[in-house]
Amino acid sequence: MKKAILATKVGMTQIFNADGVLVPVTVLEAGPCSVTQIKTVENDGYSAVQVAYADKKEKVVSKDANGKKEIRNRHGVNKAQMGHFAKAGVSGKRYVREFKFENADEYKLGDVIKADIFAEGDKIDATAISKGKGFQGAIKRLGQHRGPMAHGSKFHRHQGSNGACSDPSKVFKGKGMPGTGGGEPGDLLLKVTVGTRPGYERKGSDVYTTISIPYTTAVFGGEATVPTLYGNVICKIREGMQSGSKIRLRGKGIVSMKNPSIRGDQYVTIQIQVPQNLNYTAKEKLHEYARACGLERSNANGSHVA
């Protein structure tokens, strides 16, 4: 069954595969995409699903007391587009595309398509507009060869011959010549690799996780190892740390889609490991601590009650 989603390129990075080989990878932020219209054969002549991606501010036109028109977000979503999005119950979006799914009739307005529709090992055909490079010569644009670079050569990086003069007296279509480089749609075959991250929860660019620390570390303070997306981090635990306390790790979250140099934060919730199977001496020490803090009392039979 066909699956599709809209995504934005975040940047490039590198990972180690199972064999320990360093592999360059492209990081994409895929979705979420909102379904804004269902195309049907009866109404539109074909079956498809229209989806929208990336929030965009609404264009606002108002008039002041003197009747002068004021425009905010000049390049934002206009009224007609906002009305279209309102029918689906979604906010203004920047990109709108259509996908011809076999099961298009199963989708409903307002449904959200996320990256979890893909599984590890899926092959993807990614289509995008390449980076525009402006006007380029034939060597950079088409990979043509240059001429001799010696002083007497009259041909270095010039275009070269374009064809005969009198016959056919024209340049055939498709002749490789200088021109605008990039900016044209192209296809790139991708393979999905899903890295499982159990125990992590994502909210925007921030990541939330939970760690357990020993009872003694919570009481006396110390250090704890916190796993992050970028490796382990050693954090200091203050004395008297309570269960449910949070630690903020700056810059250990997800890379921002708008600015790859900015990362979110990681918030760590502390859970204290309650000691089990204590021997008699350890239990007596805990009872002494509880009595010193006024946390327990003794019954008539001498047993301890917290």
Image (cartoon, grey):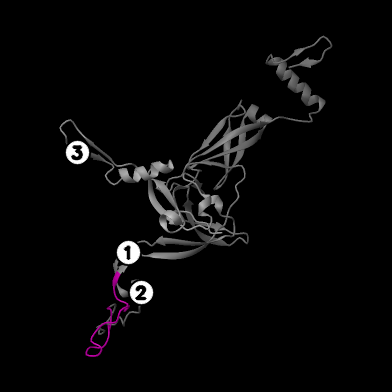
Task: Please indicate whether residue 10 sits to the left or right of residue 176 in the image.
Answer: right
Q: Earlier in the sequence, mark 1 or mark 3?
A: 3
| Quarter residue 272 falls in | top right
Disc 1 residue crowd, few under 14, some 14–19, many 20+, Cα 10 Å: few
Main SS class of the magenta portion in the image: loop
Q: Residue at x 64, y 32 (%)?
A: 271
Pointer 2 residue: 142
For the image, the number of numbered tags is 3
Pointer 3 residue: 69
Pointer 1 residue: 133
Pinpoint residue 192: horizontal percent, then vertical percent.
55, 58
Cα separation, mark 2 vs mark 3, equals 49 Å
Please say if the residues under marks 1 and 3 sit with CB atoms less than 8 Å apart: no
Which quadrant does the N terminus fall into?
bottom right
Task: Please indicate whether residue 302 sits to the left or right of residue 219 in the image.
Answer: right
Nearer to the camera, 217 or 171: 171
